[in-house]
Image (tube, rainbow, N blue to C red):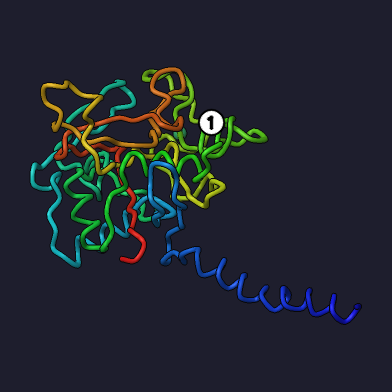
Amino acid sequence: MTILKYFRWAKYLLLLPLLSCHIQSSTPIPPAGMVYVPAGSTTKGFFMDIAPVTVAEFDSFVKASNYVTDAHQFGNAGVFNIEKGGWEMIDGANYLYPLGKDKPQAEKNHPVTQVSWRDAVAYTRWAKKRLPTYQEWKWAAMNGQEDWDKIYPWGDDLTEGGSYKANVWQGVFPHYSKVEDDFQYTSPVGYYGKTPLGLTDVGGNVWQWCQDWATLQVDTLSPNAEKLQYGGSFLCDKNICHGYKIGNTAHSTPETSLCHVGFRCVRDIGN
Ligand SMILES: [Ca+2]
């Protein structure tokens, strides 16, 4: 009787290694620099860049492909003037000099800015990736969890132990900036830590281009006029735009380049 019981258990024990192999192989292994975002009710599973594309990474693409950005072609780009509290078109502003030629050069480990939607798409093709959809962005910001009920990708609070969880605007936008989070403009990618899913800069730092048209957000007579952006930027004040809250968006025309808009890529599983 005892021996019989042992054999009954033994057959299940023999199955355990097979079962664990099956569980491990069902979770796709992400390429370097990406995380796996599991499937949800509105999205398939996909890989997403851990961080926004940096100045150094975008510069590698430009040099490798002799790509000319929209800002270079137009000879100017949009810069937010902190002193005046408004946007200006600045001659010579581009991804290497996002605030203009008379201001410091872009830091290599900061997210690239002054890239239009068209520039971002050109990069994604070169990198054999693509831009995320709004649904994918929101799902990743919810850490791939249907029951994620927090305000932000990292939780409910903007600060933890006195330290900020994202690069946003403190004070009163646009005329009073306190810079309590160490950065007036962009910050190095990853500076404020990772979300539970393993992503950085999901809220704050720079808005990031989505694949989608801003169909519902823009005049419905011209639904294909502007592209969505996700995540908020260093210019976002909690009381005005609150762009770093999960689900909030901005939008611009596909050729627009601004000093607070960048992007990151996703890749379909199996590609
Ligand atoms: Ca800031």
Reply above or below: 206 against 44: above
Which residue occupies the foreground of this view, 116 or 74?
A: 116
Toward the right, the furthest residue is 2
Q: How many marks?
A: 1
Task: Quadrant for residue 30, please give it.
Answer: bottom left
Residue drawn at x 50%, y 63% as measured from the top left: 27
Split into 4 quadrants, where in the image is the N terminus? bottom right
Reply above or below: 186 against 61: above
Task: State the image coordinates of residue 79 (x, y, percent, origin top left).
Answer: 25, 33
Task: Quadrant for residue 7, please give it.
Answer: bottom right
For the residue labelled by badge 1, is the local secondary structure a helix, a strand or a loop? Answer: loop
- State ligand 1's quadrant: top left
Toward the front, the furthest residue is 1
Residue drawn at x 13%, y 45% as measured from the top left: 70
Task: State the image coordinates of residue 156 (x, y, percent, origin top left).
Answer: 58, 30
Amino acid marked by disc 1: Glu
Reply above or below: 215 against 7: above
Split into 4 quadrants, where in the image is the C terminus? bottom left
Cβ of disc 1 within 8 Å of ligand 1?
Answer: yes
Task: State the image coordinates of residue 241 (x, y, percent, origin top left).
Answer: 38, 22
Residue 267 relative to residue 145: left or right? left
Which residue occupies the foreground of this view, 93 or 229?
A: 229
Residue drawn at x 12%, y 54% as measured from the top left: 68
Task: Quadrant for residue 22, please give it.
Answer: bottom right
Residue 70 relative to residue 269: left or right? left
Residue at image mark 1: 180
Task: State the image coordinates of residue 187 (x, y, percent, origin top left).
Answer: 43, 44
Q: Residues within 10 Å of mark 1 (few under 14, many from 20)?
A: some
